[in-house]
Image: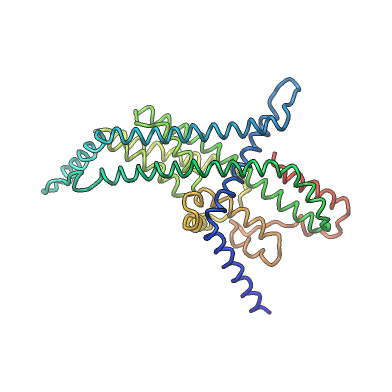
Amino acid sequence: MSIVRVAAWLITIALVLALIVLGKSYLVPIVVALVFWYLVNALNDQFQNLPLGGFRLPNAVTLLMSLGFIVLGLYFISDMIVNTVNGFVQESDVYLPRIEQQIANVYARLRIDRPPPSITQLRIGQELLGNLALVFAGVTSAAKGVALVLLYVLFFLVEQGSFPRKLRALGLDMRSSTRFAFVLQEINTAMRTYLGVKTLTSIATAVLCFIIFQVIGLDYALFWAFLIFLFNYIPTIGSITATALPALLALVQFDTLTPFLVVVIGVTIVQLLVGNIIEPRLMGSTLNISPLVVVLSLILWSMLWGIVGMLLSVPITVAIIIITAQFPQTRAVAILLSRNGDVNTRKLNRPGRKESEHREGVVEAEDATTIA
């Protein structure tokens, strides 16, 4: 029986991986739509609590306001990216000679006898224009995908109102309904905490870095600040990449190394301060995930889903830990993925549940499914 069970698990894992890889074009928009769904409901909660002298806006109105806020944000972001890429293309004649000059400076400082290679020999101009063309194509493709994602978000918003009724209609027993309610509540809490804290700390990091860029006069400071905000969602390598790109521009834009060092040291200090001191205090123990697992999941999901996989690697892994922790057959997986092995499922294992607990579990499920 153990051999059959192992074989069944291997076949299941293989089928899931095949679905993730082959169904990438269908699954990625749905998963991204779930993230936007959380953001829409989080904004809806804030709009619902606006101080209007005791008057509360209708839920439908605040949902439309939240969705419109996100759509406007996406529009301004795409417009900023397009304008930045256009700026790079138009000023390529300015940046390319500066790159050539910096190469010559390096050769002079290292006292290399042979003449430094030119831009034409290195084909930097061709590579730069080729990469900018890829960015344009990526923005166009992302714009098409955003329309599909927003359509999915609308379906989720419509469906969330009827889901509690469907849950009651299932007629689950006390244990199943309580377990289901607990899993939804835990996932909801973890996702809200992660997205909320990560967004707040990413905004703080981007604002502080934007101030540094403005002080030294770095070109496209707003774009680099947004890039830092976005890459801050990618564990480990995100902060490194977000620091390296504006630092390279500073190295090309200015004649001295001082602005380059200011960018590297300043952004690094901000990343360490926010990421290693402020963020863990705000996050607390909500995300019980091993640092090694964070890196491995980042590598895995980046191979499967690219940039989107990098951005969503932590939320997906946290959801896997929460779900696998609720069942004896998969609890070992949750323990291995967790940070300290403490996977608390005592809420589901108390003997002698009463019918009131059953009703409480269903109510918790309703609260958990209506993310607000």
Q: x, y (%) of residue 184?
A: 71, 50
119 vs 25, nearest the viewer: 25
Residue 357 percent coordinates (x, y): 84, 51
Residue furthest to the right: 355
The structure residue drawn at horizontal position 50% and vertical position 54%, both measured from the top left corner, is 305
**Residue at position x 78%, y 51% in the image:** 167
Q: Which quadrant would the C terminus be assigned to in this image?
A: top right
Q: Position of residue 125 (x, y in %)?
A: 25, 43
Q: Where 256 falls versus 3 (above or below)?
A: above
Side (left or right) of 299 relative to 46: left
| Identity of the residue drawn at 61% across and 46% down | 34
Left or right for 161, reference 107: right
Measured from the top left, where is residue 284 in percent x and y? Answer: 61, 45
Above or below for 265 versus 341: above
Quadrant location of the N terminus? Answer: bottom right
- 102 sits to left or right of 231: left
When asked about the image quadrant of residue 246, the answer is: top left
User: Residue at the left extreme?
Assistant: 113
Q: How many numbered circles does the render carry?
A: 0
Q: Residue 227's quadrant in the figure?
A: top left
- Looking at this view, is 136 or 59 the one in front? 136
Using the image as rendered, state which of residue 216 and residue 184 is in the foreground.
184
